[in-house]
Amino acid sequence: VCVVFTVSLVLRLHEGLNCNYFLQHAGEVYGEKSILATEARELQSRLFSLSDDRDKSLAVIEEICQTLKLRLDVAEQERIKAEQEKLEKDEIAQKSLVEQENIMDKVVQESKMLQQEAEENSKLREFLMERGRLVDMLQGEISVICEDVLGLKERIDGRMPLSSSLSSSHILSSLASSTSSRTNTSSGKLPCSVESSENPGTLSEEILKTEQLVSSTESSDQLVVLEADHKAISDDDWEYFDGEVELSH
């Protein structure tokens, strides 16, 4: 009986100890579960907050994307417009450059033409000066010849002796020298030859008649020379002068 009682006491004591342990362990488990639930709620709250922040950030990002897209469209339009303006300006500049080049070419051509005209004017001036000097010489010679002819006519009309101041040899020498001088000058200056005229002028006819009267006692050779000289004088005096005038024009 005593042993059975002891065993029952031990069993009861063991059961009591197990119950206390169970209760203590259960309290610990429930306490930990409560703590975990609290932490879970905190984590869930943090997750909700993070989700809200994410949504807000996505909205901001979307707004930024829209703004950047608008700015990109505006920038693209401005770029296209700038390229078009640049092409137009380049085209205008190219046209202006071509016009300036054409103007410069015209200026260069006009400058060359003016230079050529200036050279031609200078040559023409020299030509006219030379021909002026030649005309002066011819005029002087013709004046001398006219004076001689008038003197001869006065002497013939007045029946004065011809040997006092003028002789046929003097006339021949003066005519020959003037003819030779004009022939040399024309051959050196004129670009074209001067043909002799078939009909001499009135002045040459008077000279020829007068000389024939004066030199009636001379030889036939001198008469031939005199006639040839008179024709050369008439032709060289007038046709040469006419040719010079035509050349100057």
Image (tube, grey):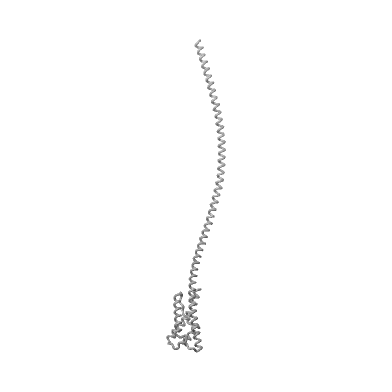
User: Residue lying farthest bottom?
Assistant: 159
Give the residue at the far front of this rendering: 164
Where is residue 131 shown, x and y percent of the image? 48, 75
Q: Is residue 117 above or below residue 32?
A: below
The answer to which quarter of the image holds residue 66 is top right
Q: Position of residue 190 (x, y in %)?
A: 46, 75
Task: Between residue 236 and residue 246, name the one nearer to us.
Answer: 236
Residue 213, compared with residue 55, is above or below; it is below
Q: Give the answer, above or below, for where 26 lies relative to 181.
A: above
Which residue appears farthest toward the top when viewing the image? 1
Image mark count: 0
* Residue 233 falls left or right of residue 68: left
Viewer-proximal residue among 194 and 19? 194
Q: Position of residue 38 (x, y in %)?
A: 56, 28
Q: What x and y, as percent, mark residue 8? A: 51, 13
The answer to whether 99 is drawn above or below residue 36 in the figure is below
